Image: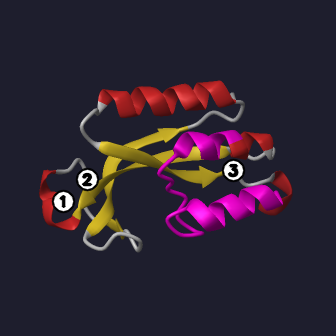
Amino acid sequence: MDNALERYIHENALRPDVLIFREPEEFVKLLYASGERADMLVWYEYTSIAEQGSSLGGGGYADPKNEGFMWAETPFFHMLTKGQRREELLSLIRTFTQRYRGHELAPEFYLSKHEEEQK
């Protein structure tokens, strides 16, 4: 993995193993610039723990930087195609978040495994 991408993940992801970002479009741009891709998106809603019952999701990850808030996992996900272009992925993210205006949604990215890693 590219050093700039690793640094961005370390500084901006919810956790190094949970790739949820407040600015997912910035991550997508860096992801593609580094030659990496994602296979799947799982959608989370940022909500207060106390109001989790009225969110689109339930359960998930506490926000370590903002006590009392969390990323609640929704039932929404997208499987991505192997040749998905950057602009297609950005459009998918924009369209999906626009569809659910009023909810602060962000995807968790599942990165593609390289063929040599799968052998």
Marks 3 and 2, Cα distance to the nearest angstrom?
25 Å
Identity of the amino acid at label 2?
Answer: Gly
Identity of the amino acid at label 1?
Answer: Gln
Identity of the amino acid at label 3?
Answer: Ser
Question: Total of numbered circles in the picture?
Answer: 3
Say left or right for 31 vs 75. Answer: right
Q: Is mark 2 on a helix, strand or loop?
A: loop
Say left or right for 76 vs 6. Answer: left
- Mark 2 surroundings: few (<14), some (14-19) or many (≥20) residues within 10 A: many
Residue, disc 1: 52
Mark earlier in primary sequence (2, 1): 1
Residue, disc 3: 112
Mark earlier in primary sequence (3, 1): 1
Mark earlier in primary sequence (3, 2): 2
Contact flag, marks 2 and 1 (Cβ < 8 Å): yes
Task: Classify residue 68 by image quadrant.
Answer: bottom left
Q: Position of residue 9 (x, y in %)?
A: 64, 61
Residue 55 visible at all: yes
Residue, disc 2: 57
Task: Classify residue 12 by image quadrant.
Answer: bottom right
Q: Where is residue 11 in the image (x, y as percent from the top left)?
A: 62, 65
Q: In which quarter of the image is the C terminus?
A: bottom right
Which residue is nearer to you in this view: 18 or 77? 18
Residue at (13% x, 57% y) in the render? 53
Q: Where is residue 90 in the image (x, y as percent from the top left)?
A: 57, 31
Q: What element carries label 3?
A: loop
Q: Give the range drawn in magenta.
A: 1-29
Which residue is nearer to you in this view: 4 or 53? 4
